Image (spheres, rainbow, N blue to C red):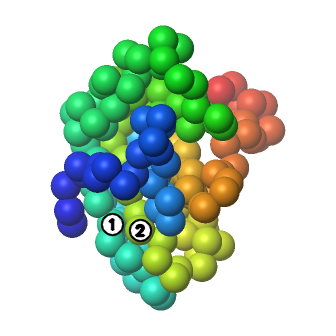
Amino acid sequence: MNTFIPGTSHFTVGGAYYPTGHVFTMFADEAAARAAAVRLAQVPDMGDITLATPAAIQHAFAKRAADVGAGAPSVGREDQFMLRFVELAQGGKPGLLIDAARAEPESISAVLNTAGALLAYYYRALVIEELIDTTPRAEAAAAGKL
């Protein structure tokens, strides 16, 4: 598995993180991220899968995170998502950067949902698609687990 170092092509001209054709997802711990990576590698037509350690995420986005609100804002929600990545990384949460290549988004979503991903954003050409349902479950609320 590769180490997370975002390339310049993963950022817009304005500096927002937008890795077109990729999914960025985060997990509770590295074991969960690695287990998901193994399952994702079995999805037909999947591209490269890169582990993003909490330190690597914080390092990659430190400057942009500090500049959010001070410079040119992103047109969409890119900066909000990136700030969430940093927040989770500060709490020790790792992520995966997935080159979706020609894999079916539904197949990626199915793996991530069953693997316990905390969030997953698919950066398409003109839209960012959430691949997992992050709404609280009624069962968890009823059990006092929220």
Residues at marks 1 and 2 touching, judged by CB atoms closer than 8 Å: yes
Vertical relation: 58 (above or below) 101: above
Q: Three-letter amino acid code at disc 1? A: Ile
Helix, strand or loop under label 2: strand
Answer left or right for 67 relative to 110.
left
> Which is closer to the viewer, label 1 or label 2?
2
Answer left or right for 88 relative to 128.
left
Q: Where's residue 62, x and y in %?
A: 30, 25
Vertical relation: 13 (above or below) 48: above
**Disc 1/disc 2 C-alpha distance (Å):** 6 Å
Residue occupied by mark 2: 99
Asked if one can make out residue 132 in the rendered structure from this viewpoint, the answer is no
Q: Which residue corresponds to the image point at 45% horizontal and 54% vertical from the top-left? A: 19
Q: Nearer the viewer, residue 44 or 63?
A: 63
Q: Which residue corresponds to the image point at 37% horizontal and 55% vertical from the top-left? A: 9
Quarter of the picture containing the C terminus is top right
Helix, strand or loop under label 1: strand
For label 1, the crowd category at 10 Å Cα-Cα, with few meaning under 14, some 14 to 19 and many 20 or more, is many
Q: Nearer the viewer, residue 17 or 115?
A: 17
Q: Where's residue 100, x and y in %?
A: 48, 71
| Identity of the residue furthest to the bottom in this view | 44
Q: Three-letter amino acid code at disc 2? A: Asp
Q: Which residue corresponds to the image point at 66% horizontal and 37% vertical from the top-left? A: 76
Q: Nearer the viewer, residue 28 or 44?
A: 44
For label 2, the crowd category at 10 Å Cα-Cα, with few meaning under 14, some 14 to 19 and many 20 or more, is many
Q: How many marks?
A: 2
Q: Where's residue 55, x and y in %?
A: 22, 33
Residue occupied by mark 1: 49
Answer left or right for 131 relative to 10.
right
Q: Where's residue 44, x and y in %?
A: 47, 87
